[in-house]
Image: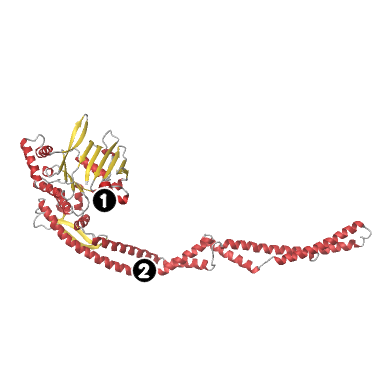
């Protein structure tokens, strides 16, 4: 529950410490005293959007801190999940709003985003303001209210599991059918890739290996040609060796008489022998250089085929291998899609049957809940001085949604004998407030939110109806904490904890103070509400009597 609120520099509230009771807490005060500021402050610590305009003029920032105690197991579990400590089942939530428009949020002094405050706050406090009456005018919200009243979400949870599985199956089936429409063209493309690349049986890096081998083979061919040309130059027609022999013959007859020619003749003879030896070694070397013409042709042809595919598919050898592997996998998927489509269609039919049966069971459960709901709410409305009002539930079957096949709308008949009609066409503002209170009352023990705040639930009512609202708020206060802002004495007298919001002039500034009232203070405030300022002794006695009467209820 909300144990205490600390407010500093929030609009006209300079500083206030507001203690709260675990039961019914009532805030009263003159119009314009600042009751709405209090609600704004609570909204701020709940992570709601707030503006810099709420910062007190001349101050750097506004600070609102709320102390929550006796946290529910659900809240403790959530805090554990978020790694936030909660010693003694307590936490403090703080919101600082800067005059420049920024804000800082903290849980137990640990900085937290406003979204986290909102998430935690939704589990701690339920605020009902005048705008919440719009829920009654929106038929789409009525199904949630009915389910909240029912309290057992087992059938709905089971239905949603099946429904979401059905959605996923239908989505997958749709994707496959869409793929089927383009399967023929895609199959042609994939088969072309498989035929082009598969025929070569490529492996990663093969093109580089072939390039090296091809270059080596071409070099061998050139080497052999060069060797044979050299041999031919030495031993062929008009070869060097023949010319040397001819030179020897020409000077052989003069070697005996000319020492110089003899020396040159010997050198020519040595050159002849050397050339013969060179020619022999060249022949031997030529035999050692391998040349496989067929291999060279194969290498050239394969490299040409690979390079053509590389150009066609704009990728390298590794890319061609991957393209082939991917095409093989995809073509298998396409070929198996017919089987998968048939399997998914069968599964969809099975799930559709199952979810329909679950929806029927859920519909029947809600039909039973609707009867109990109308009985309970009608009784509450009768208590709230709306005895002539009849509430009914229009419950019809529609298409399957995540919430079932149900369409639900609350109807009312304001006068006996009239057919129930949509609430939006019948109810006044005051009636909406009481109907909403009746709904809150019947579901008060169905949820785990410990604190309910009613901001001017008494709008449009007075007299006996207001008294009944006060009694009903007090009844709710017995099962959970209730905080209510009111301007009616019939409701204020029901308070377990009565707080006065009062505007005062301090120096040259207006300040709003929040005071917890004792019995005398309550008597004075109730008398003021009943009869205005400076109440008479009789009015004070009446106020005391009303407070005493309320305490005995």
Q: Which residue is mark 1?
A: 75
Q: Residue at x 58, y 61 (%)?
A: 208
Few, some or many residues within 10 Å of mark 2 (<14, 14–19, 20+): some
Element marked by disc 2? helix
Which of the two residues, 284 or 202, is positioned nearer the viewer here?
284
Residue 168 location (% of width, % of height): 33, 62
Question: Residue farthest to the front?
Answer: 88
Residue at the image position 28 percent from the left and 52 percent from the top = 77
- Please give the name of the residue rendered at 37% of the width and 66% of the height, measured from the top-left corner: 177
Q: Please identify the quarter of the rendering in which residue 143 is found.
A: bottom left
Q: Residue furthest right?
A: 257
Number of callouts = 2
As helix, strand or loop, the secondary structure at mark 1 comes to helix
Q: CA distance from mark 1 to mark 2?
A: 45 Å
Q: Say which mark, if any, is on residue 341.
A: 2
Instruction: Report whether 173 appears left or right of 312.
Output: left
Q: What x and y, as percent, mark residue 353? A: 27, 68
Relative depth, front residue between 118 and 327: 118
- Residue 432 in sight: no
Left or right of 336? Residue 308 is right
């Amino acid at each position: 529950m909300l144990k205490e609120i600390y407010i500093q520099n929030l609009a006209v509230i300079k500083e206030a410490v507001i203690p709260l009771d675990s039961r019914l807490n009532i805030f009263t005060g003159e119009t314009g005293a600042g009751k709405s500021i209090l609600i704004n402050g609570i909204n701020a610590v709940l992570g709601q959007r707030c503006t810099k305009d709420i910062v007190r003029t001349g101050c750097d920032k506004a600070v609102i801190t709320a102390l929550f105690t006796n946290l529910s197991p659900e809240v403790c579990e959530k805090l554990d999940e978020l790694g936030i400590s909660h010693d003694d089942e307590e936490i403090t939530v703080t919101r600082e709003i800067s005059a420049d428009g920024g804000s800082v949020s903290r849980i137990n002094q640990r900085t937290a985003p406003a979204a986290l405050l909102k998430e935690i706050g939704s589990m701690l406090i339920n605020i009902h303001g005048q705008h919440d009456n719009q829920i009654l005018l929106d038929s789409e919200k009525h199904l949630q209210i009915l389910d909240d009243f029912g309290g057992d979400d087992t059938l709905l949870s089971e239905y949603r599991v099946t429904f979401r599985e059905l959605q996923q199956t239908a989505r997958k089936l749709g994707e496959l059918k869409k793929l089927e429409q383009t399967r023929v063209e895609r199959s042609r493309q994939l088969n072309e890739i498989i035929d082009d690349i598969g025929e070569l049986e490529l492996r990663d890096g093969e093109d580089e290996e072939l390039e090296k081998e091809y270059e080596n083979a071409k070099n061998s061919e050139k080497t052999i040609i060069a060797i044979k040309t050299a041999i031919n130059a030495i031993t062929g027609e008009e070869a060097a060796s023949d010319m040397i022999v001819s030179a020897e013959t020409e000077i052989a007859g003069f070697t005996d008489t000319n020492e110089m020619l003899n020396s040159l003749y010997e050198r020519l003879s040595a050159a002849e022998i050397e050339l013969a030896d060179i020619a022999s070694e060249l022949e031997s070397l030529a035999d050692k250089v391998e040349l496989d013409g067929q291999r060279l042709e194969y290498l050239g042809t394969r490299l040409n085929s690979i390079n053509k595919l590389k150009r066609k598919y704009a990728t390298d050898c590794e890319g061609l291998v991957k393209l082939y592997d991917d095409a093989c996998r995809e073509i298998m998927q396409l070929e198996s899609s017919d089987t998968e489509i048939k399997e998914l269609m069968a599964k969809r039919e099975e799930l559709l049957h199952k979810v329909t049966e679950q929806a029927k069971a859920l519909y029947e459960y809600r039909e039973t809940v609707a009867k109990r709901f109308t009985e309970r709410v009608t009784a509450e409305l009768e208590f709230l001085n709306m005895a002539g009002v009849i509430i009914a539930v229009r419950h019809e079957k529609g298409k399957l949604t995540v919430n079932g096949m149900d369409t639900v709308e609350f109807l009312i008949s304001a006068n006996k004998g009239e057919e129930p009609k949509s609430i939006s066409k019948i109810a006044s503002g005051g009636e909406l407030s009481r109907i909403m209170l009746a709904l809150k009352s019947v579901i008060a023990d169905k949820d785990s939110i410990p604190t309910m705040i009613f901001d001017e639930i008494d709008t449009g009512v007075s007299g006996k109806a207001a008294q009944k609202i006060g009694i009903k708020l007090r009844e709710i206060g017995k099962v959970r904490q209730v905080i209510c802002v009111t301007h009616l004495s019939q409701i204020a007298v029901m308070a377990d904890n009565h707080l006065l919001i009062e505007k005062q002039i301090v120096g040259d500034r207006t300040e709003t103070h929040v005071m917890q009232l004792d019995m005398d203070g309550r008597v004075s405030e109730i008398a003021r509400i009943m009869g205005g300022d400076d109440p008479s002794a009789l009015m004070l006695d009446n106020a005391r009597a009303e407070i005493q009467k309320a305490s005995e209820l």
